[in-house]
C-alpha cells in the first residue's frame, strides 16, 4: 500500500536546497556535507513530490545542520519537549493550505532564474551528536545516516507522516527507495538488525 500524505499538500515543480551549517563539527567530519545534503534532499523531493505539473513553480527547502543544544532548544520551544532529537521538520504549510506557487503568500527572498520567487516548503534541522550516536549504534556511516535523516525530514515537509503503522510502513518504503538510489541499504532493516 502506498504511503498516504495530506492531499492538501500537493507539490509541483523542482526543489532548491539551501544548506546552513551552524555546527562546524559537521564540516570537520564530512567536508562535502552540503553537497551530500543537497543530493539527498533533491532525491527525496523527486520521489516524494507530485511532479505531474513540473515547471509550474520552484520550491525551496532549507536544511540546518546544528548540534544537540540547538535542536533541543527548538524542540523545547516548538514542540514542548526538552530533549535533543535527531531531526525536526518545520513545514511552511498547514493542513488545508495548498502548497501551490501560484497561490501561496509564503515566499522566500531568493529569486529563480526566471525572476519568480521560490516557495519555501520548510526547514529540516538535524542534530550532530544525536546523529553520530545513532549511526554508531546502528553500525552505519554518518554519511548514510545523515542521508536518511535528510530524506525523512524532506518527506515530512511534503506531507508524509508516520502517525499510524500504515503510514509509517509507507513512508519507510519511500525512504528505502530514495536511499537505494545511492546504494544505501534499507535503514529500517539495519535498525531492526542492530536491536536483535
Image (cartoon, rainbow, N blue to C red):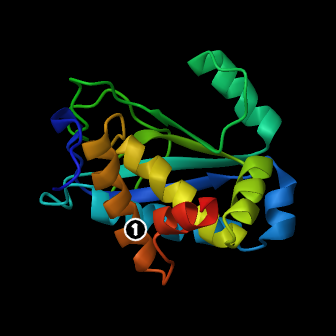
Q: Residue shown at 36%/50% (left/top)?
A: 59
The percent coordinates of residue 172 (x first, y second) are 37, 57
The percent coordinates of residue 52 (x first, y second) are 12, 60
The percent coordinates of residue 148 (x first, y second) are 53, 61
171 over 106 or under it: above or below: below
Which of the image's four quarters has the N terminus? bottom left
51 over 110 or under it: above or below: below
102 over 142 or under it: above or below: above
**Residue bearing mark 1:** 176
Could you say which is closer to the camera, residue 133 or residue 115? 133
**Residue 142 visible in the displayed image:** yes
Residue 53 placement, left or right of 12: left
**Residue 119 visible in the displayed image:** no
Could you say which is closer to the camera, residue 169 or residue 39? 169
Could you say which is closer to the camera, residue 145 or residue 101? 145
Q: Residue shown at 67%/72% (left/top)?
A: 140
Figure quadrant of residue 106: top left
Residue occupying the far left of the picture: 52
Q: Residue shown at 77%/55% (left/top)?
A: 133
Residue 148 placement, left or right of 81: left
150 over 177 or under it: above or below: above
Which of the image's four quarters has the C terminus? bottom right
Residue 54 placement, left or right of 77: left
Crowding at dot 1, Cα within 10 Å, few <14 / some 14-19 / many 20+, comes out as some
> Tag 1, which secondary structure?
helix
Total tally of numbered discs in the picture: 1
Residue occupying the far front of the picture: 196
The percent coordinates of residue 6 (x first, y second) are 22, 35
Amino acid at each position: 500500500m502506498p504511503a498516504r500524505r495530506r492531499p492538501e499538500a500537493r507539490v509541483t515543480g523542482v526543489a532548491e536546497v539551501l544548506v546552513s551549517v551552524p555546527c562546524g563539527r559537521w564540516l570537520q567530519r564530512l567536508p562535502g556535507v552540503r553537497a551530500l545534503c543537497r543530493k539527498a534532499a533533491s532525491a527525496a523531493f523527486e520521489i516524494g513530490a507530485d511532479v505531474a505539473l513540473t515547471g509550474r513553480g520552484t520550491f525551496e527547502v532549507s536544511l540546518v545542520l546544528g548540534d544537540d543544544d540547538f535542536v533541543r532548544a527548538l524542540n523545547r520551544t516548538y514542540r514542548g519537549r526538552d530533549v535533543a532529537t535527531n531531526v525536526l521538520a518545520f513545514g511552511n504549510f498547514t493542513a488545508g493550505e495548498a502548497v501551490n506557487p501560484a497561490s501561496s503568500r509564503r515566499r522566500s527572498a531568493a529569486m529563480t532564474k526566471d525572476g519568480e520567487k521560490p516557495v519555501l516548503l520548510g526547514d529540516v534541522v538535524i542534530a550532530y551528536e544525536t546523529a553520530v550516536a545513532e549511526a554508531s549504534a546502528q553500525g552505519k556511516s554518518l554519511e548514510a545516516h545523515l542521508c536518511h535523516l535528510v530524506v525523512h525530514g524532506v518527506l515530512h515537509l511534503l506531507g508524509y507522516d508516520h502517525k499510524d503503522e500504515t503510514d509509517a510502513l509507507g513512508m519507510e518504503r519511500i525512504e528505502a527507495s530514495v536511499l537505494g538510489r545511492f546504494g544505501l541499504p534499507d535503514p529500517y532493516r539495519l535498525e531492526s538488525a542492530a536491536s536483535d
